[in-house]
Image: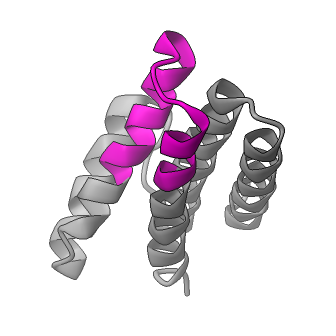
Amino acid sequence: MTTQKYQNATQVLLQQAGDELAAGDARQAAEKGWGAAAQAVKAVCEERGWPHHSHHLLRRVVNRISEETGDDRVELLFERAQNLHKNFYEDFYNVEEVGRSLVFVHEFVDKLDALSG
């Protein structure tokens, strides 16, 4: 997959997350939000030639980006996205909570998009 395909997937998943949220499906909205965050990280990886085939590697990349940019918020935003992924399995967030977390996912995606050349 190319950087552009990952970026496109990010936007599609963000849209789907909003649609699922509007339909009242917190579980699916959360998973789409997580997927958007993961795809955004993969886009950065693809552009830089970094491996990205596991959740662990995505976490390491986010740490690296945070160190490179001096922006600790990147890690915090990614943690919110990871919690959305956990929600898919545990279904502990309601629609309002997922909605608040999706705001953070959008911020995370914007930060990563700004790194693209």
Above or below 79: residue 3: below
Depth check: 83 or 97 in front?
97
Q: Quadrant location of residue 54?
A: top left
Which segment did they paint magenta? 78-101
Depth check: 84 or 98 in front?
98
Depth check: 101 or 39 in front?
101
Residue drawn at x 54%, y 42% as measured from the top left: 98
Query: How many labels sit on residues?
Result: 0
Quadrant where the C terminus sits is bottom right
Q: Which residue lies furthest to the top in this view?
A: 90
Would you say residue 110 sits in the magenta stretch?
A: no
Residue drawn at x 57%, y 50% as measured from the top left: 99
Residue drawn at x 22%, y 55% as measured from the top left: 63
Dominant secondary structure (helix, strand or loop) of the stretch shown in magenta? helix
Would you say residue 89 sits in the magenta stretch?
A: yes
In the rendered image, residue 52, in percent from the top left (x then y), is placed at: 47, 42
Left or right, 69 with respect to 12, comes to left
Colour scheme used in the picture?
A: one colour
In the rendered image, residue 88, in percent from the top left (x then y), is placed at: 56, 20
In the rendered image, residue 75, in percent from the top left (x then y), is placed at: 25, 56
Q: Is residue 41 visible?
A: no
Residue drawn at x 40%, y 37% as measured from the top left: 82
